[in-house]
Image (spheres, grey):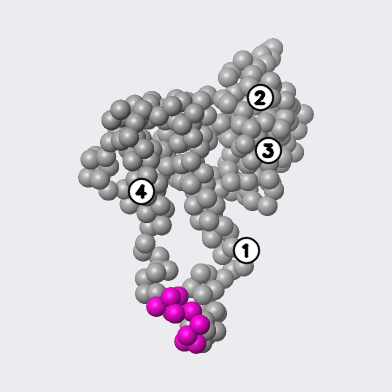
Amino acid sequence: MTTTESSGSGDVSRSMELLWGTGERATRGPKPGLTLDRIVTAAIELADAEGLAAVSMRRLSTELGAGTMSLYRHVPGRAELVDLMLDRVQGEGAQAPEPATVEPDAVQSAPGWRKTVEKAARDELALYQAHPWLLSVNQTRPVLGPGAVGGMESMLAGIKDTGLSDPELISVIIMVSGYVSGVARTQVHAVEVQQVTGISDDEFWRAQEPMLSTVMTSGRYPLMAALSPEAFGPDFDHFEFGLQRLLDGLEVLVEQRTKR
């Protein structure tokens, strides 16, 4: 998570060829055991287990039991490999399971576009949880492969009847994705800090308790001191609360547009 990668930082044309299936170069003789699909799969599994920084062509060659140079016959380098990894997991997003916190009755009664956005947000959060290394990829200039384009197509199909303009539809996607990535980053960092320090959340907050107890009884922070014990408790679903408020605001705009 400490290393930042940039999508599209390699040979973009070559990445596009590989993503859309036009760049796999044929080899003579028996069908090779090493394929682009195997390389990308191994890279994702390695990144899931050890982080994106662990993914190198040399390390992958060891994991796959192949010579390093044989990997370069399938993918030009690490930058293009990151493009392929990113698009592969984005394509998995449509199949990501919804968290158990989803309320079926509430979802069924929501407008179609709202159900689409809710599902997309939950799927994206599940994707970050399954692949935390995604947060270390700069996606401001994405290389658009079938995974990314398919996800956009699915999202647009669900929200196109909102009455919003095309730029506004794209803005909805950006807005929701930005919200989800922010929540995901906090969740992933919470897990990381426990792994790195070996200190649990309970231990961390208990260490601050003596000083905070004194500070809160000083009268200097009456609003903070008056908060209930549940204010910072683990039972409140901050992600779901924020998502519903975001959608509430969007619903006001949609109603205005569709009533014209």
Which SS type dominates the magenta stretch?
loop
If you read the primary sequence from the N terminus, does the residue marked by circle 3 or circle 4 appear first?
3
Residue to which mark 4 is pinned: 244
* Number of the front mark, 3 or 1: 3
* Number of the front mark, 2 or 1: 2
Give the CA distance from mark 3 to mark 1.
Answer: 25 Å
Magenta residue check for 204 = no
Amino acid at the residue labelled 4: Gln
Q: Which residue is drawn at 34% across and 45% down?
A: 248
Label annotation for residue 15:
2
Nearest the viewer among 74 and 217 is 217
If you read the primary sequence from the N terminus, does the residue marked by circle 3 or circle 1 appear first?
3
Q: What stretch is highlighted in magenta?
A: 217-226
SS for dot 2: helix
Q: Residue at x 59, y 68 (%)?
A: 198
* Number of the front mark, 3 or 2: 3
Q: Which image quarter: residue 126?
A: top left
If you read the primary sequence from the N terminus, does the residue marked by circle 3 or circle 2 appear first?
3
Residue 149 is situated, as x and y percent measured from the top left of the image, at 51, 25
Determine whether, in the image, residue 39 is placed left or right of residue 73. Answer: left
SS for dot 1: helix
Residue to which mark 3 is pinned: 6
Label annotation for residue 196:
1
